[in-house]
Image (spheres, grey):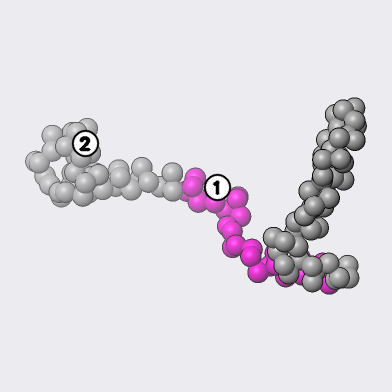
Amino acid sequence: MSAGWPDEATLATLDEKEVLADPYGMLGSLIDFSFMMSAALPAWTALAGLSADQAYYLRSYVLAATKSERTPFLLRALFVSAVGFVEPLVTRLVELLLFRNACGSYESLADPRLDEDALTGVG
């Protein structure tokens, strides 16, 4: 093996049935991933000597340091429902206020100009 990759002689000994039976296992046995990890991440070799407790602490620390604050899904769904419920009511309230304050400007509450004015904020 040169630089973590299998050489031609090793590849020539592969049996088709073995490769088809477990392609990922075969690939894992041929390629030296620890060499590639040490080449890609030089600090990886220092982490290899950690005990199980140290590795768990490091994993927990990295996850806690990179964890983004997220709003719970149920709370987001409740917010979307509330906004979806309130938004048409606010538009309707603006229409009623425009109709009340501009006596005679609109024919009725069904006037299309009232909808346009309520959405654009003109009145």
**Mark 1 residue crowding within 10 angstroms, few (<14) / some (14–19) / many (20+):** few
Q: Determine whether, in the image, residue 98 is placed left or right of residue 93.
A: left
Q: Nearer the viewer, mark 2 or mark 1?
A: 1
Q: Is residue 21 visible?
A: no
User: What's under tag 1, amino acid-wise?
Assistant: Ala
Q: Residue 77 versus residue 112: which sits nearer the camera?
A: 77
Q: Determine whether, in the image, residue 81 is placed left or right of residue 96.
A: right
* Quarter where residue 58 is shown: bottom right
Q: Residue at x 84, y 38 (%)?
A: 11
Q: Residue 87 versus residue 66: which sits nearer the camera?
A: 66
Q: Residue at x 82, y 44 (%)?
A: 7
Residue for badge 1: 77
- Residue that sits furthest to the left in the current view: 104
Marks 2/1: CA–CA distance:
33 Å
* x and y, in percent, of residue 91 in the image: 30, 45
* x and y, in percent, of residue 77 in the image: 55, 47
Numbered range of the magenta stretch:
53-82
Tell me the tag on residue 23.
none
* Quarter where residue 20 is shown: top right
Residue for badge 2: 109
**Mark 2 residue crowding within 10 angstroms, few (<14) / some (14–19) / many (20+):** some
Looking at the picture, does residue 91 appear above or below residue 50? above
SS state under label 1? helix
Q: Residue 81 versus residue 11: which sits nearer the camera?
A: 11
Q: How many marks?
A: 2
